[in-house]
Image (cartoon, helix red, strand yellow):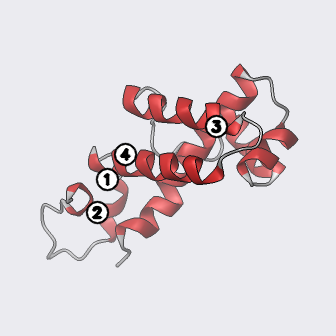
């Protein structure tokens, strides 16, 4: 049994990073190496996000609330100096929003004990 946060690390976090990376490259004309430095990941990971071979497990790019939070993160990530604590808070808010909306559920439920029927763990306060 995996706990939801483990599933989120493997699915939600890469989806958020992919959206951030693509936005930085497309709308801010940043090179992969710059994006990698800003996000604290490898250039290879950024390349995979750009090719959409990583980070596409959960489609989040067309969710207005997610877009609003990622836009706020982009604003902070392009500031000098980058207020990392604020970016982390927004990242966690984005993950929580995705989990609250049940977007991670199809990926998480198969890993749960069959006795847990109708799981609503992620939407609990």
Label 1 or label 4, whichever lies nearer to me, is 4
Disc 1 designates what residue? 106
Residue 2 location, x and y as percent?
38, 75
| Residue 40 x, y percent position in the rendering | 74, 54
Q: Are marks 3 and 1 in contact (CB under 8 Å)?
A: no
In the rendered view, does 116 fall on the left or right side of 3?
Answer: left
Q: Mark yes or no: residue 51 visible.
A: no
Determine crowd level at label 3: few under 14, some 14-19, many 20+ residues with C-alpha closer than 10 A: some
Instruction: Name the element at disc 3.
Output: helix
Dot 1 crowding, Cα within 10 Å, few <14, some 14–19, many 20+: few
List x then y, in percent, for residue 96: 36, 51
Front disc: 4 or 3: 3
Q: Please report contact status of discs 4 and 2: CB closer than 8 Å, yes or no.
A: no
Say which of 61 and 93 sits in front: 93
Cα separation, mark 3 vs mark 2, equals 34 Å
- Disc 1/disc 4 C-alpha distance (Å): 12 Å
Q: Secondary structure at mark 1?
A: helix
24 relative position to 118: left or right: right
**Residue identifier under label 4:** 98
Q: Which residue is mark 3?
A: 76
Pair 3/2: label in front: 3
Q: Mark 4, mark 2: which one is toward the viewer?
A: 4
Instruction: Point out which mark residue 109 bears.
Output: 2
**Which residue is drawn at the image coordinates 74% and 23% (left, top)?**
28
Looking at the image, is mark 4 or mark 3 earlier in the sequence?
3
Say which label, 1 or 4, has the lower sequence index.
4
- Quarter assignment of residue 73: top right
* Figure quadrant of the N terminus: bottom left
Q: Is there CB contact under 8 Å for labels 3 and 2?
A: no
Rounded to the nearest whole Å, what is the CA distance between mark 4 and mark 2?
15 Å
SS at badge 4? helix
Crowding at label 2, few (<14), some or many (≥20) Cα neighbours within 10 Å? some
């Amino acid at each position: 049994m995996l706990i939801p946060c483990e599933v989120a690390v493997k699915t939600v976090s890469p989806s958020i990073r992919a959206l951030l990376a693509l936005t930085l490259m497309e709308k801010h004309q940043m090179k992969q190496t710059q994006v990698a430095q800003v996000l604290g990941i490898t250039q290879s990971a950024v390349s995979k996000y750009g090719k959409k071979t990583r980070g596409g497990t959960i489609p989040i790019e067309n969710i207005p609330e997610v877009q609003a939070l990622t836009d706020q993160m982009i604003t902070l990530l392009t500031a000098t100096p980058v207020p990392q604590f604020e970016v982390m808070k927004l990242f966690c808010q984005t993950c929580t929003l995705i989990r609250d909306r049940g977007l991670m559920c199809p990926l998480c439920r198969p890993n749960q004990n069959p006795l847990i029927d109708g799981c609503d763990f992620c939407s609990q306060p």
